[in-house]
Image (cartoon, helix red, strand yellow):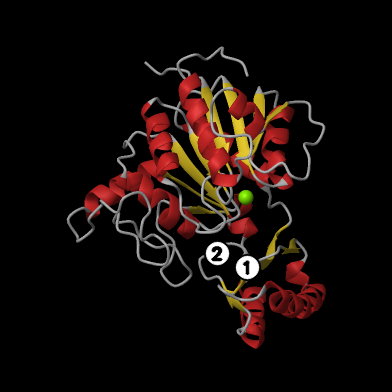
Amino acid sequence: MRTVPPLGLLLDVDGPIASPETRRVPDGIVTALVSLAGRGIPVVFNTGRSADFVLQHVATPLLAAGLPGDARFHAVCEKGAVHFSFASLTETAARNAGDGGTGQGGAGQGGTGGDPDAGLPRATRGHGVPAWMGVDARMRLPADLESRLVRLVGDYTDTMFYDDTKLAMFSAEMNVGESPERYRAAQRDFEDRVADLLAEDRSAEAFQLDSTIISSDVEHVSSGKDLGAERSWALIAADGELPMRWFTCGDSRTDYAMADWLQARGAPVVHVDVRHEDGVPETPYRVMTSEDLAAHGFGTSEARHEEAGQAFLEWALKTTGAPNATM
Ligand SMILES: [Mg+2]
């Protein structure tokens, strides 16, 4: 019998799950997610990061910690352009078990920079796309435009690098350890040239430049956390019952778009803001912060990013037995 899960979670990755500083997913988060999976709670990681990043930094520690094979876990990456389901991963990892992977890495330790040890494949421009991963062809940068952008990065390699794990969008990211001031100066110059290139290329019409503090992205205009929410809904609807209530969680203003989309769809949703320094906007749905979580005994009111993310997941775990619980 298929049961209706009391909640479903759409989680931004950088911030609430992976530390923005170390990129590591803390053990407490891994443990809480594995427990949620065991209770049939659907979870979608909705991120601007690449699928390869999610495989290495999120999936690897989860599988090492024993994520069940029937977990309703999915990932929507590159702001909606790429997706995969964890069910395909547990099969792949099981097949590759014994190929030297220890599978006991201890929740992400050594996951910074090293190869994954859960038997998971890479997904990069060089390695190709695994059959179980979906890339929206419509959102893929035209090959010619992409190679022109890649060539352009060649003039700025002292401050940035081309991220070849992005399968649909283009990203030039700040070199690790680069000074933000030096990067910003180079980025301004680089982005002027990107804008010129986009303006003169007719195939670039459906693409836009997004400038962030650590990267310059060229992405399809439909990209966003709202598109990610739409894809998440489809992935969850395809593998079982839809949850009674939805929770979205993120550390940026753009993450509210997940809750906006669900609210517009008529689904009951609460947004959890793990870094509300910029204030909480007026929304037609409830917003939770570390203060609310602390009031219920989860984490501290000063908790931010992954600390607040962990408090939220532990709270969610506690309420799964009581679907009508209110905050
Ligand atoms: Mg984030």
| Residue 273 at x, y percent in the picture | 66, 38
Q: Distance between the residues labelled 1 and 2?
A: 6 Å
Would residue 5 be seen by someone viewing this image from the given angle? no
Q: Residues within 10 Å of mark 1 (few under 14, many from 20)?
A: many
| Residue 210 at x, y percent in the picture | 73, 62
Quarter of the view holding residue 177: bottom right
Q: Is residue 264 left or right of residue 10?
A: right
| Residue 263 at x, y percent in the picture | 71, 28
Q: Is residue 229 left or right of residue 206?
A: left
Q: In this view, does 110 lie to the left or right of 161?
A: left
Q: Which residue is drawn at 67% across and 75% down?
A: 145
Of residues 227 and 212, which is closer to you in this image? 212
In the structure shown, which secondary structural element does the residue marked by tag 2 occupy?
loop
In the structure shown, which secondary structural element does the residue marked by tag 1 occupy?
strand
Would residue 203 be seen by someone viewing this image from the given angle? yes
Q: Quadrant of the N terminus?
A: top left
Q: Which amino acid does label 2 sit on?
A: Lys
Of residues 208 and 64, which is closer to you in this image? 64
Up the image or down, 186 lies above or below 125; here it is below
What label sits on residue 170 in the rendered view?
1
Up the image or down, 222 lies above or below 300; here it is below
Q: Label 2: which residue?
A: 166
Residue lying farthest left? 98
Q: Which amino acid does label 1 sit on?
A: Phe
Evaluate if marks 1 and 2 touch, with contact meaning CB atoms under 8 Å apart.
yes
| Residue 299 at x, y percent in the picture | 54, 33
